[in-house]
Image: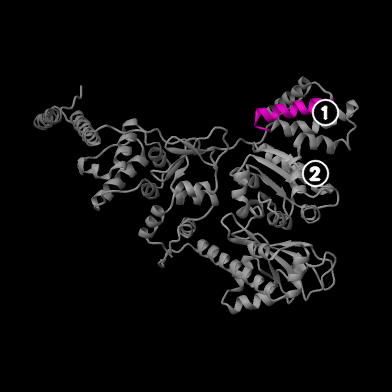
Amino acid sequence: MSIPEATIQNILSSSDIVEVIEGYVRLTKSGRNFKARCPFHNEKTPSFMVNPEKQIFHCFGCNIGGNAIGFIMKMEGLTYPEAIRKLAKKCNIEINETYSKTNDKLSEERDAIYKILNDAGLFFQKHLAENAVIKNYLKKRGLTDETIEKFQIGYAPKSSKTLLSAAVKKGYSKDLLYKSGVISNEKDFFINRVMFPIFDITGRIVAFGGRVLDDATEATEGSPRGRSPVGAIVPKYLNSPETAVYSKSRVLYGLNFAGKSIRENNSAVILEGYVDVIMCHQYGITNTVATLGTAFTPQHSSLLKRYTDNITIAYDPDTAGRSSAIRSCEVLLNDDLYVKIAQLPDGKDSDEILISDGADKLKNIFSNSKSYIDFFIDEKSDSFDVKTIEGKRGLIKLAIPVISKIPNAVVKSEYIKALSERLAVREEIIKEELSRLKTEIKRYGSDSKQQMPPAENKINIEERNIISVLAGDIKLMDYIPEDLQIEFNSGEIKNFFETLRMLRKKGRDSITSAELVEIAGSDVISKILTAGDFKPSDPEKFVKSFADAVSIRMERKKLDKIKVSDMEKFVEISRKMKGSKKEHGTDTE
């Protein structure tokens, strides 16, 4: 299927790029533009600019730019049609797509999977609504009707083929049902479980998590992948397998609900499970998210960095939870985020604290979280006697590799100071150990540095200025003769100029910067249009002068190629050049 060009332009003209980008990144006013730290690469000084007048963005650090559609594509990893559909939904614009022989099969399959997952979510919600026993079970767990509705919680029936039968009856192929992760081995993937849809940041269902009703045993007719025969112990939680639309290392549960609150509070709290997140949101602690049965990854860190620099980790207080908290901190610190670790009371999860003591108690625990280095020392003190030389040496040896990777000099300095004070070891000694580690890394190698996008081709300032002016008023193309062949240094500038010429030839009197960026598909062009810093007092005169100068250069080149025997042609061209100078007053000396 394809989306009509007129519809795309209607979507672009109806959307506000500032509003779109603020849904992902914190923007601050900077003159007539807005700025932020780029969400596409790590940087300390904001170089990501958004121009509300032209409805385009550009990062002057990594040279990525575009319009609202391009931003959504890059930010969410969506295909071009998917990004258009998402923006259209935001603008309440209906898309009537036309069929094409060149359909993107992968995109069609992803769309089908999203539809299956959405229908599966409705299926689970329907079965919960019809089951008073399960509804009562959830209420006993402290969940309100409003929370159940908000998070679209459902129930997977006991019968092992209920969803499979309903889906096939609706016309879905078994192949797509397998690829969606809702069936396995000719049976439903989830059986007799409370179901929690897992959403991406746009609010689409990308997977499910299922919780057993009894932590010990579940007698069922069957089980996914044959893991749980009747009466056997089954996993307390079971998540969907990874699919074309779901990767657990790239999704944080609840971020679609928490994003706005995280930005407003300038902090995020990472919890261990989706029930913890749901209960926190129910009690008004809405800047909470959770990982999904996987270790915290750099991709998770990048997601959170779009919203805040301040992270609190509040995993379960058992040994596994504390170890996971330390590992997660190391990933976050390496991404230049400020991290603290909350200490939950032994034997209590966050949802249990909420039910027994209320939201203020849990908020107080989060507020009194420890810095990573203090938590690390407390944890490792059980393994090392820090009163002895051997103990101090061992603990420092564990801490140094983490501290060395912290990019923020202030945080690194504070951690060195804290380690020094806690272990009664001079800061100079710790710094020496850091230097020694740095020397070893240089000698034996280290992780490859992040690859930045290649620098753009050098663009002549004259070319940059003429493109900026012509893009601002396409009618000025009329002053550039059709037969004038301009030799641009940059291939992208040349292509863009020809695009402007073609649009004007078709009768376009005006065109927005957002539409131009969409047509050009060039980060170089978005950079020029975002900057928009060249504005001649008389644009018409500027364009005419440019055309004359190019024409004269072309004639000079022709003269250079003419042999002495071609005297008549030489004289003819010379006269043309003199006439051009007299007519326009162009000084070429």
The one of 67 and 340 positioned closer to us in this rendering? 340
> Which quadrant, please, contains the C terminus?
top left
Residue 508's x, y, as percent? 26, 51
386 left or right of 333? right
Asked whether residue 192 appears in the rendered view, the answer is: no
Residue density around tag 1, few if under 14, some if 14–19, many if 20 or more, within 10 Å? some
Vertical side of 429 occupied by 95: above or below: below
Is 267 drawn above or below residue 173 in the view shown? above
Q: Is residue 388 left or right of residue 532?
A: right
Which label sits on residue 139? Answer: none
Asked which secondary structure carries label 2, the reply is loop
Name the residue carrying label 1: 422
| Residue 471, percent from left and from top | 32, 42
The image position of residue 259, as x and y in percent, is 60, 50
- Tell me which segment is drawn in magenta: 406-423
Q: Can residue 19 be spotted in the picture?
A: yes
Disc ID at residue 343 = 2
Find the residue positioned furthest to the left. Answer: 568
Magenta stretch, main secondary structure class: helix
